[in-house]
Amino acid sequence: MKSFHHRMALVLCLQVLGSLGGWLSLYISFCCVNKHRSYEWSCRLVTFAHGVLSISLSAYIGFIDGPWPFTYPGSPNTPLQVYVLCVTLGYFIFDLGWCIYFQSEGSLMLAHHILSIWGIILALVLGESGTEVNAVLFGSEITNPLLQIRWFLRETGYYHSFIGDVVDFLFVALFTGVRIGLGAHLLFCEIVSPKPKWFMKAGGIAMYTVSWCFMLSIWRFAWRKSIKKYHAWRSRWSVNQQLKHDRHLKTH
Protein backbone atom coordinates (compact mmCIF):
# COMPACT_ATOMS: atom_id res chain seq x y z
CA MET A 1 0.00 0.00 0.00
CA LYS A 2 2.84 2.37 0.90
CA SER A 3 4.63 1.69 -2.38
CA PHE A 4 1.36 2.33 -4.26
CA HIS A 5 1.03 5.76 -2.61
CA HIS A 6 4.66 6.51 -3.42
CA ARG A 7 4.06 5.63 -7.07
CA MET A 8 0.96 7.80 -7.19
CA ALA A 9 2.83 10.71 -5.63
CA LEU A 10 5.61 10.27 -8.19
CA VAL A 11 3.10 10.23 -11.05
CA LEU A 12 1.44 13.41 -9.77
CA CYS A 13 4.81 15.16 -9.39
CA LEU A 14 5.79 14.18 -12.93
CA GLN A 15 2.48 15.47 -14.27
CA VAL A 16 2.91 18.80 -12.49
CA LEU A 17 6.53 19.10 -13.67
CA GLY A 18 5.42 18.26 -17.20
CA SER A 19 2.76 20.95 -16.99
CA LEU A 20 5.26 23.49 -15.64
CA GLY A 21 7.65 22.62 -18.45
CA GLY A 22 4.87 22.94 -21.01
CA TRP A 23 3.79 26.42 -19.85
CA LEU A 24 7.40 27.56 -19.62
CA SER A 25 8.09 26.29 -23.14
CA LEU A 26 5.01 28.07 -24.43
CA TYR A 27 6.18 31.30 -22.78
CA ILE A 28 9.66 30.98 -24.32
CA SER A 29 8.06 30.34 -27.72
CA PHE A 30 5.91 33.46 -27.42
CA CYS A 31 8.99 35.48 -26.40
CA CYS A 32 10.84 34.27 -29.49
CA VAL A 33 7.92 35.02 -31.82
CA ASN A 34 7.16 38.42 -30.23
CA LYS A 35 10.69 39.77 -29.83
CA HIS A 36 9.47 43.33 -30.40
CA ARG A 37 7.01 42.98 -27.51
CA SER A 38 7.56 43.04 -23.74
CA TYR A 39 7.95 39.93 -21.60
CA GLU A 40 4.57 40.72 -20.05
CA TRP A 41 2.97 40.47 -23.50
CA SER A 42 4.17 36.87 -23.82
CA CYS A 43 3.23 36.02 -20.24
CA ARG A 44 -0.29 37.32 -20.77
CA LEU A 45 -0.62 35.22 -23.91
CA VAL A 46 0.22 32.18 -21.78
CA THR A 47 -2.30 33.34 -19.17
CA PHE A 48 -4.95 33.75 -21.87
CA ALA A 49 -4.24 30.24 -23.21
CA HIS A 50 -4.45 28.74 -19.72
CA GLY A 51 -7.68 30.62 -19.03
CA VAL A 52 -9.40 29.28 -22.14
CA LEU A 53 -8.13 25.74 -21.50
CA SER A 54 -9.03 25.67 -17.80
CA ILE A 55 -12.49 27.16 -18.39
CA SER A 56 -13.24 24.55 -21.05
CA LEU A 57 -12.00 21.58 -19.01
CA SER A 58 -13.47 22.67 -15.66
CA ALA A 59 -16.82 23.43 -17.33
CA TYR A 60 -16.85 19.95 -18.88
CA ILE A 61 -16.05 18.43 -15.49
CA GLY A 62 -18.72 20.42 -13.65
CA PHE A 63 -21.56 20.31 -16.17
CA ILE A 64 -21.01 17.00 -17.99
CA ASP A 65 -18.52 14.61 -16.40
CA GLY A 66 -19.51 15.35 -12.80
CA PRO A 67 -19.99 15.11 -9.94
CA TRP A 68 -22.00 18.31 -9.39
CA PRO A 69 -19.95 20.51 -7.00
CA PHE A 70 -22.97 22.07 -5.25
CA THR A 71 -24.28 18.65 -4.26
CA TYR A 72 -21.18 16.48 -3.80
CA PRO A 73 -18.35 18.58 -2.31
CA GLY A 74 -15.59 16.50 -0.78
CA SER A 75 -16.08 13.66 -3.27
CA PRO A 76 -13.13 11.47 -4.35
CA ASN A 77 -11.16 12.91 -7.24
CA THR A 78 -11.82 11.60 -10.73
CA PRO A 79 -8.93 11.01 -13.19
CA LEU A 80 -10.00 14.00 -15.28
CA GLN A 81 -10.12 16.23 -12.22
CA VAL A 82 -6.61 15.14 -11.26
CA TYR A 83 -5.36 15.87 -14.78
CA VAL A 84 -6.86 19.39 -14.80
CA LEU A 85 -5.53 20.12 -11.32
CA CYS A 86 -2.01 19.05 -12.32
CA VAL A 87 -2.12 21.18 -15.48
CA THR A 88 -3.36 24.17 -13.50
CA LEU A 89 -0.89 23.66 -10.66
CA GLY A 90 1.97 23.75 -13.15
CA TYR A 91 0.62 26.99 -14.59
CA PHE A 92 0.19 28.69 -11.20
CA ILE A 93 3.75 27.77 -10.20
CA PHE A 94 5.02 29.26 -13.46
CA ASP A 95 2.96 32.44 -13.12
CA LEU A 96 3.80 32.92 -9.44
CA GLY A 97 7.49 32.61 -10.24
CA TRP A 98 7.13 35.08 -13.11
CA CYS A 99 5.25 37.61 -10.95
CA ILE A 100 7.81 37.39 -8.15
CA TYR A 101 10.79 37.67 -10.54
CA PHE A 102 9.41 40.67 -12.44
CA GLN A 103 7.61 42.12 -9.38
CA SER A 104 4.59 42.78 -11.57
CA GLU A 105 1.77 42.09 -9.10
CA GLY A 106 0.71 43.27 -5.67
CA SER A 107 0.28 41.25 -2.50
CA LEU A 108 -3.39 40.46 -3.21
CA MET A 109 -2.65 38.68 -6.51
CA LEU A 110 0.28 36.84 -4.93
CA ALA A 111 -2.01 35.73 -2.10
CA HIS A 112 -4.53 34.49 -4.68
CA HIS A 113 -1.85 32.43 -6.44
CA ILE A 114 -0.47 30.98 -3.20
CA LEU A 115 -3.95 30.01 -1.97
CA SER A 116 -4.71 28.44 -5.36
CA ILE A 117 -1.49 26.41 -5.30
CA TRP A 118 -2.07 25.31 -1.71
CA GLY A 119 -5.70 24.32 -2.39
CA ILE A 120 -4.77 22.28 -5.47
CA ILE A 121 -1.93 20.51 -3.65
CA LEU A 122 -4.25 19.60 -0.75
CA ALA A 123 -6.89 18.21 -3.14
CA LEU A 124 -4.25 16.12 -4.93
CA VAL A 125 -2.67 14.84 -1.70
CA LEU A 126 -6.02 14.03 -0.06
CA GLY A 127 -7.43 12.46 -3.20
CA GLU A 128 -10.71 14.29 -2.61
CA SER A 129 -12.40 17.71 -2.95
CA GLY A 130 -11.30 17.96 -6.57
CA THR A 131 -14.97 18.56 -7.39
CA GLU A 132 -15.23 21.91 -5.62
CA VAL A 133 -11.64 22.93 -6.39
CA ASN A 134 -12.39 22.52 -10.09
CA ALA A 135 -15.55 24.58 -9.60
CA VAL A 136 -13.49 27.31 -7.93
CA LEU A 137 -11.08 27.10 -10.86
CA PHE A 138 -13.95 27.64 -13.29
CA GLY A 139 -15.26 30.62 -11.32
CA SER A 140 -11.81 32.14 -10.95
CA GLU A 141 -10.83 31.76 -14.60
CA ILE A 142 -14.15 32.68 -16.26
CA THR A 143 -13.15 36.37 -16.30
CA ASN A 144 -9.45 35.81 -17.01
CA PRO A 145 -9.57 35.91 -20.84
CA LEU A 146 -11.53 39.19 -20.67
CA LEU A 147 -8.92 40.63 -18.31
CA GLN A 148 -6.15 39.73 -20.76
CA ILE A 149 -8.11 41.08 -23.75
CA ARG A 150 -8.55 44.34 -21.84
CA TRP A 151 -4.79 44.57 -21.31
CA PHE A 152 -4.05 43.85 -24.99
CA LEU A 153 -6.58 46.49 -26.04
CA ARG A 154 -4.78 49.00 -23.85
CA GLU A 155 -1.40 48.08 -25.28
CA THR A 156 -2.60 48.39 -28.88
CA GLY A 157 -4.56 51.60 -28.35
CA TYR A 158 -8.06 50.14 -28.82
CA TYR A 159 -9.22 50.19 -25.21
CA HIS A 160 -11.06 53.53 -25.37
CA SER A 161 -13.63 52.25 -27.85
CA PHE A 162 -16.93 50.41 -27.96
CA ILE A 163 -15.05 47.09 -27.80
CA GLY A 164 -13.28 48.21 -24.63
CA ASP A 165 -16.60 49.17 -23.04
CA VAL A 166 -18.12 45.78 -23.92
CA VAL A 167 -15.13 43.92 -22.46
CA ASP A 168 -15.29 45.94 -19.24
CA PHE A 169 -19.05 45.39 -18.90
CA LEU A 170 -18.76 41.63 -19.44
CA PHE A 171 -15.84 41.43 -17.02
CA VAL A 172 -17.69 43.23 -14.21
CA ALA A 173 -20.93 41.32 -14.86
CA LEU A 174 -19.27 37.89 -14.91
CA PHE A 175 -17.10 38.62 -11.88
CA THR A 176 -20.10 39.79 -9.87
CA GLY A 177 -22.47 37.06 -11.02
CA VAL A 178 -20.19 34.03 -11.09
CA ARG A 179 -17.29 34.66 -8.75
CA ILE A 180 -19.28 36.50 -6.08
CA GLY A 181 -22.84 35.25 -6.61
CA LEU A 182 -22.32 31.57 -7.46
CA GLY A 183 -19.15 31.58 -5.37
CA ALA A 184 -21.21 32.40 -2.27
CA HIS A 185 -23.56 29.47 -2.97
CA LEU A 186 -20.63 27.09 -3.54
CA LEU A 187 -18.97 28.23 -0.31
CA PHE A 188 -22.22 27.68 1.60
CA CYS A 189 -22.53 24.14 0.19
CA GLU A 190 -18.89 23.49 1.12
CA ILE A 191 -19.32 24.69 4.70
CA VAL A 192 -22.58 22.87 5.50
CA SER A 193 -21.43 19.59 3.95
CA PRO A 194 -19.86 17.13 6.43
CA LYS A 195 -17.54 15.58 3.81
CA PRO A 196 -14.86 18.23 3.09
CA LYS A 197 -12.01 18.58 5.59
CA TRP A 198 -12.07 21.68 7.80
CA PHE A 199 -8.93 23.11 6.21
CA MET A 200 -10.50 22.84 2.75
CA LYS A 201 -13.45 24.84 4.09
CA ALA A 202 -11.03 27.38 5.57
CA GLY A 203 -9.28 27.62 2.22
CA GLY A 204 -12.62 28.24 0.52
CA ILE A 205 -13.37 31.08 2.93
CA ALA A 206 -9.92 32.58 2.29
CA MET A 207 -10.35 32.40 -1.50
CA TYR A 208 -13.81 33.98 -1.29
CA THR A 209 -12.39 36.77 0.87
CA VAL A 210 -9.74 37.45 -1.77
CA SER A 211 -12.48 37.54 -4.41
CA TRP A 212 -14.32 40.20 -2.40
CA CYS A 213 -11.15 42.28 -2.16
CA PHE A 214 -10.89 42.12 -5.96
CA MET A 215 -14.60 42.88 -6.25
CA LEU A 216 -14.35 46.09 -4.23
CA SER A 217 -11.55 47.36 -6.47
CA ILE A 218 -13.53 46.40 -9.58
CA TRP A 219 -16.67 48.17 -8.38
CA ARG A 220 -14.65 51.33 -7.61
CA PHE A 221 -13.20 51.19 -11.12
CA ALA A 222 -16.65 50.62 -12.67
CA TRP A 223 -18.12 53.56 -10.71
CA ARG A 224 -15.33 55.92 -11.77
CA LYS A 225 -15.64 54.87 -15.39
CA SER A 226 -19.44 55.23 -15.33
CA ILE A 227 -19.18 58.75 -13.89
CA LYS A 228 -16.57 59.68 -16.50
CA LYS A 229 -18.78 58.31 -19.30
CA TYR A 230 -21.78 60.19 -17.93
CA HIS A 231 -19.91 63.52 -17.81
CA ALA A 232 -18.61 62.95 -21.34
CA TRP A 233 -22.17 62.25 -22.55
CA ARG A 234 -23.47 65.36 -20.76
CA SER A 235 -20.76 67.45 -22.36
CA ARG A 236 -21.57 66.15 -25.85
CA TRP A 237 -25.28 66.66 -25.23
CA SER A 238 -24.71 70.27 -24.13
CA VAL A 239 -22.60 70.96 -27.23
CA ASN A 240 -25.25 69.46 -29.50
CA GLN A 241 -27.98 71.48 -27.80
CA GLN A 242 -25.95 74.67 -28.23
CA LEU A 243 -25.38 73.92 -31.92
CA LYS A 244 -29.10 73.34 -32.43
CA HIS A 245 -29.86 76.59 -30.67
CA ASP A 246 -27.34 78.51 -32.81
CA ARG A 247 -28.79 77.05 -36.03
CA HIS A 248 -32.28 77.98 -34.86
CA LEU A 249 -31.20 81.59 -34.27
CA LYS A 250 -29.59 81.80 -37.73
CA THR A 251 -32.78 80.64 -39.46
CA HIS A 252 -34.70 83.39 -37.72
Image (cartoon, helix red, strand yellow):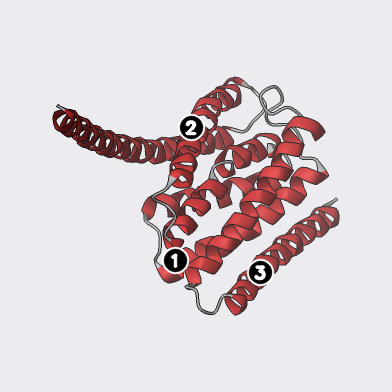
Rounded to the nearest whole Å, what is the CA distance between mark 1 and mark 2?
30 Å
How much space separates mark 2 and mark 3, taking CA atoms?
A: 31 Å
Q: Earlier in the sequence, mark 2 or mark 3?
A: 3
Quadrant assignment, res 20: bottom right
Q: Nearer the viewer, mark 3 or mark 1?
A: 3
Q: Residues within 10 Å of mark 2 (few under 14, many from 20)?
A: few
Q: Which residue is mark 1?
A: 100
Question: Which residue does the image show at 45% across and 71% down from the upper left?
Answer: 101
**In this orientation, which residue lies closer to the viewer: 158 or 251?**
251
Given residues 99 and 150, the one toward you in this image is 150
The amino acid beneath tag 1 is Ile
In the rendered structure, the answer to whether residue 74 lies left or right of residue 105 reads right
Label 3 neighbourhood size at 10 Å, few (<14), some (14-19), many (20+)? Answer: some
- Amino acid on which the number 2 mark rests in the picture: Ala
CA–CA distance between discs 3 and 1? Answer: 19 Å
- Residue 173's disc is 2
* Circle number at residue 26: 3
Q: Position of residue 239 (x, y in %)?
A: 21, 37
Residue 192 picture location, percent across and down = 58, 20
> How many residues crowd around disc 1 within 10 Å: few (fewer than 14), some, or many (20 or more)?
few
Say if 218 sits above or below 117 in the image.
above
